[in-house]
Image: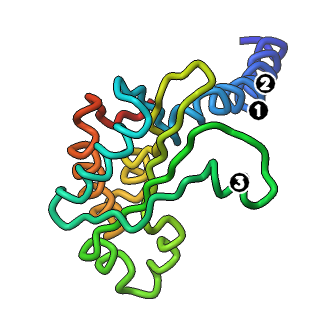
Amino acid sequence: MSKRSFIAGLVLGMVIAFFIIPFGFKLAFKNMLFKEVPSSFGFEKTVSLITDRINHQSGWHVTNVINQEQVLLDNGGSEVGKVKIIKFCNAKLSSKMLKKDDRKYMSVKMPLSISVYEKSDGKVYVGLMNGYLMSRMFSGSVEGDVMESVVKDIENVMSFLHFRYTIF
């Protein structure tokens, strides 16, 4: 191998490492971190089904349903269409997560949220964080163990939409 081909390979490798790979992550990041699931039900029916299913899932309860559309309008925002955020919690899992001081930072994502929204074309969607990815990031820790339990329960709640977590 000549010195010239070594340098060309090194430069090409640096271009790929510094530009192409980060660009690929940027394109995939939205689909990795957030999940959007179409609903075959109307807006209010989807909200009702999710809240009922959460409340019937062992250990879980809905803490609040926020009418985000109304909150925005009431506080000077503009019309965004139908958006509701369902806040929910499992006291036993939350207690396990927050029991130790070094895990209290996890409270930033509590209670958990699922959003239901209607797009301008009239189709209804459910939005949620990718719990599977989060559980993998914390694997081997108490945080990861708790998140794995949460993932299983949320998949059960969302099974009426044939939803399963995946990495992408």
Residue at 76% x, 61% y: name it. 75
Pointer 3 or 2: first along the chain:
2
**Residue 72: mark:** 3
- CB contact under 8 Å: marks 2 and 1: yes
Q: Nearer the viewer, residue 157 or 44?
A: 44
Q: Please tell me whether mark 3 or mark 2 is closer to you in this view.
A: 3
Q: Which residue is mark 1?
A: 18
Residue at 72% x, 59% y: name it. 74
Give coordinates of residue 48: x percent, y percent. 33, 46
Give coordinates of residue 19: x percent, y percent. 77, 28
**Residue 94: mark:** none
Q: Nearer the viewer, residue 45 or 23?
A: 45
**Residue 15: mark:** 2
Instruction: Please tell me how crowded label 1 is: few (under 14), some (14-19), or many (20+) other residues with Cα within 10 Å.
Output: few
Please, what secondary structure does the residue beneath circle 3 have? helix
How many angstroms separate mark 3 from mark 1 (CA)?
40 Å
Q: Within the image, what quadrant is residue 9 found in?
A: top right
Give coordinates of residue 14: x percent, y percent. 77, 28
Could you tell whether 92 is left or right of 111 in the image?
left
Residue type pointed to by label 2 = Val
Give coordinates of residue 162: x percent, y percent. 26, 28
Residue at 78% x, 45% y: name it. 78
Name the image colouring: rainbow
Please, what secondary structure does the residue beneath circle 1 have? helix
How many angstroms separate mark 3 from mark 2 (CA)?
44 Å
Pointer 3 or 1: first along the chain:
1
